[in-house]
Structures are given as structure tokens and as C-alpha cells.
Image: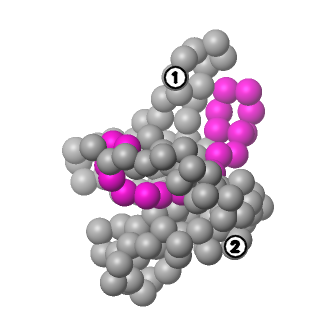
Amino acid sequence: MAKITTEQVKKVNSKCSNKWRLDTQYYLYHGEKRLINIIELDKENYLQFALCYNNQNQMILHISKFYHKQGANYASTSGLGKCKVLVETPVKRKNVNNLINYTNQLDHTRLLELNKSTPVSKSNGLILESEAF
């Protein structure tokens, strides 16, 4: 299991732009740094954007829609969500600094545009496709 200090998290978060932050839970479970940003749609629904790398070392944006019932301790999502390749050229090394530098291009207006123009990911039959959002 990966470890990270509060100071390291603060250091990464302070370098991010447009309210992006390190997804510490993902890092602790998977050992891979990715950045997240959340946009609330209404009192019970929000979009979560994850800036990370795919298995081909391309920078991608993964979008999920979550439902959080008021008063509940957890939010839920279903399906695959959406995935958009932002930088086609693969990198040799997955570097969080490249992700941090890219956050200045992804403000909430741009994120909502990307969500609108990105179709729901297709299923391979094992996991359900998300409803359009």
C-alpha cells in the first residue's frame, strides 16, 4: 500500500490550478497519482473529473456522474462514465507534474464543454454503460 504525507499532498495541491487536487484515496489504494476536480450540478448530483494516464501512457480525462442523497454518508455512480484522451502522444514516464501543468487549461467552463462533447464509454459486456449525462 502506498504512503504519502500531509505535506506532500499540500505541495501537490498548491501547484494545481482551477481547484484541481490530488486524489489521495486513489493514490493510497492504487499507488498512482491522479488529480480530481468536482463540479456540483445540483444538491444531489455532481460530476467528478479525473486527470490521469491510460495504459498507453496518454493523458486522459475520466468523467463520472455521482448521486449523493442528502444525509447519506456516501455517493454512488454506475457504469463506465466517459473518457477523453487529452494528449495523444504517449509519455515515457507517468509524471504528476505534467498533470499539474495541464490543470491551468481545465477550468470549470472547459470541463463542462468536454463533458458535453464526450460520449459515454462503450461497454465490453462486463460492465454496464453509463446513461448519457
Label 1 neighbour load within 10 Å: few <14, some 14-19, many 20+ = few
Instruction: Tell me the element at label 1.
Output: loop
Q: Mark 1 points at which residue?
A: 74
Q: Where is residue 113? Give x, y as percent.
A: 70, 63
Query: What sort of colour scheme is used for the picture?
Result: one colour
Give the residue displayed 48% in from the left and 46% down from the top: 5
Q: In the depicted view, which residue is nearer to us: 114 or 55?
A: 55
> In the image shown, does 84 or 129 lie closer to the viewer?
84
62 drawn magenta: no
Gap in angstroms between the C-alphas marked 1 and 2:
30 Å
Q: Do the residues labelled 1 and 2 touch (CB within 8 Å)?
A: no
Label 2 Cα neighbours within 10 Å, binned few <14 / some 14-19 / many ≥20: few
Which amino acid is tagged 2? Gln
**Residue 35 percent location from the top left of the image:** 54, 57
Instruction: Check the image and report above or below for 70 versus 30.
Output: above
- The reply to whether residue 119 is visible in this rendering is no
Please report the bounds of the magenta region as a residue range: 28-46
The residue furthest bottom is 89
On the image, the x and y values in percent for residue 103 come to: 65, 67
Let me know if residue 36 is in the magenta part.
Answer: yes
Residue at horizontal 27%, vertical 43%?
1
Q: Residue 114 carries which label?
A: none
| Residue 8 seen | yes
Residue occupied by mark 2: 105
Amino acid found under the numbered disc labelled 1: Tyr
- Furthest residue to the top? 71
Q: Earlier in the sequence, mark 1 or mark 2?
A: 1
Circle 2 — which element?
helix
Image coordinates of residue 108 in percent, x first then y, are 74, 57
Q: Residue at x 47, y 58 (%)?
A: 34
